[in-house]
Image (spheres, rainbow, N blue to C red):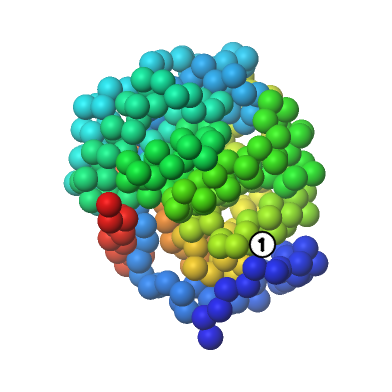
Amino acid sequence: MKELKYDWTKAEVDALFELPFFELAHQAQTIHRLWHPASEIQLCTLSNIKQGGCPEDCAYCPQAARYHTDVEAEPLLSVSTVLDQARIAKEHGASRFCMGAAWRHVRDNEEFDQVLSMVREVADMGLEVCATLGMVNNDQAQRLADAGLYAYNHNIDTSPDFYDQIISTRTFDERIETLQAVRDAGITVCCGGILGMGEETTDRAAMLHVLATMDPHPESVPINRLVKAPGTPLEDQDDLDIFDFLRTIAVARILMPGSMVRLAAGRTEMSREAQALAFLLGANSIFYGEKLLTTPNPEANEDRELLEVLGLEPRLAQPPTR
């Protein structure tokens, strides 16, 4: 029976992580097939509309101005450039177009007006439009909604307890406040985290517990695998075991059956076999294209070949009506 649960306990989430892998896989696949077409996958393309120069100190991010990385700060892209990117993405099968800006928070200025124009025109193409612009207040979230924004991405990154070991310039509660502003404006929520930053399994469980006790659940849950960017504090972090990553995918699917679970950053380091396992465990969305913000992403033609081998078909866009 298709029912959503919002009162998961931490003990219940911990218990899922402790299941034998094949038992966990069976539960995740069973739930996935109940809630989603087994052969359908959502293709998303991400445009880095404003690169670098961010004042935050997120330990994983090469766009932070304080770290010496190979990412150069660049101005906001023009509306025409972004629209060209969106058209190409749609032609290549993407149903969601995401726009990311390296800002701490949105400011009410000409650049935000420019982003609103991008949202309106990309939405008019029939694509699901997503944005990740940092913190937003209620008024800004409403303006994005009025422009036709379908989803807003604002990851919690990790557990509340581990959070301050990764970021000091923005609190965990501030992230939750932005998510609430987005939800109040009627925009769907895209929220997940990053694995492999030195956290424990209990932190991964706690992160998913936060998401799974939101009512409603985030409609999209991106699960990122740390990309160790040179010049960032996490550049020498030990690699995350692939089965720890896959377990997190499976638990996310069980906790949030109706959500899209997205393989996001880090797919370049995953074998085709590991990606196939992730899809089997309930991942049904990927970022598709050459770059994911400033980290490499598998080439689109490689993705198409893999999806063809696996018999996966692109999901159609479901943009809001305005």
Position of 20 relative to 55 (above/below): below
Residue at 48% from the left image edge and 37% from the top image edge: 139
Q: Position of residue 159 (x, y in %)?
A: 72, 47
Query: Looking at the rendering, which quadrant does residue 45 occupy?
Result: top left
Residue 94 in sight in this render: no
Is 139 left or right of 215, judged from the image as shown?
Answer: left
Quarter of the image where one finds residue 256: bottom right
Find residue 55 and report its horizontal and vertical position in percent: 59, 19
Q: Is residue 268 left or right of residue 225?
A: left
Q: Residue at x 48, y 55 (%)?
A: 220
Judged left or right of residue 92, residue 132 is: right
In this view of the protein, can residue 209 be seen by the observer? yes
Q: Is residue 72 above or below residue 209?
A: above
Q: Is residue 49 above or below residue 126?
A: above
Which residue is rendered at x = 32% and y = 41% of the image? Answer: 147
> SS of the residue at dot 1?
loop
Q: Which residue is mark 1?
A: 213
Q: Position of residue 4 (x, y in %)?
A: 57, 73
Three-letter amino acid code at the position of disc 1 = Thr
